[in-house]
Image (tube, helix red, strand yellow):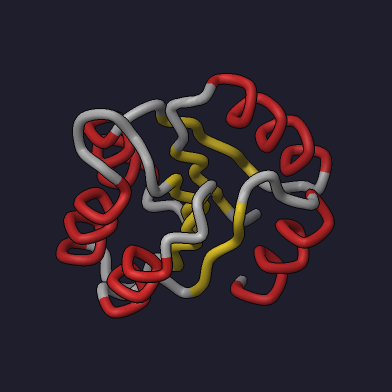
Amino acid sequence: MKKLLVVDDQYGIRVLLNEILQKDGYIVFQAANGVQAIKTVEEENPDLILLDMKIPGMDGLEILRRIKSTHPNIKVVMMTAYGELNLINEAIRLGAATYFSKPFDIDDVRQVIRDHL
């Protein structure tokens, strides 16, 4: 069974993704910030991470950088609310597999996850 980690400071988004992705048969972990995200990666070694770009404290790019430095094979999909192409380009350069924009269509998210697992 594939393991997913949802990293987003917005509780509602974590709960929504958790509920839908569990129904799809994934084991889902949640993190509200970079420290929790990195701890979960160390403990659970997820197959794929949905990572929000804008997180207070350690932002998405920094979290991505840290995860990729220790776990280069984990697929990371960025979530962005702003279509900031400079940040997206940097995320792809740092090893993100792809990204989608918020508000997202949940079927698009499911398809992206299937494509990358």
- The image quadrant of residue 59 is top left
Q: Position of residue 66 (x, y in %)?
A: 17, 55
Residue 15 screen position, x and y as percent: 65, 24
- On screen, residue 43 versus residue 82, left or right, reads left
Which image quarter holds the N terminus? bottom right
Any part of residue 47 in sight? no
Residue ID at (55%, 49%): 4
Can residue 105 be spotted in the picture?
Answer: yes
Q: Is residue 60 above or below residue 87?
A: above
Q: Is residue 51 left or right of residue 67?
A: right
Q: Position of residue 93 (x, y in %)?
A: 28, 79
Farthest residue to the top: give it: 11
Camera-side residue of 31 and 26: 31
Residue at the (60%, 74%) spot, across then down: 116
**What is the tally of numbered marks visible in this picture?**
0
Which residue corresponds to the image point at 32% horizontal and 30% vertical from the top-left?
A: 33
The residue shown at (55%, 20%) is 11
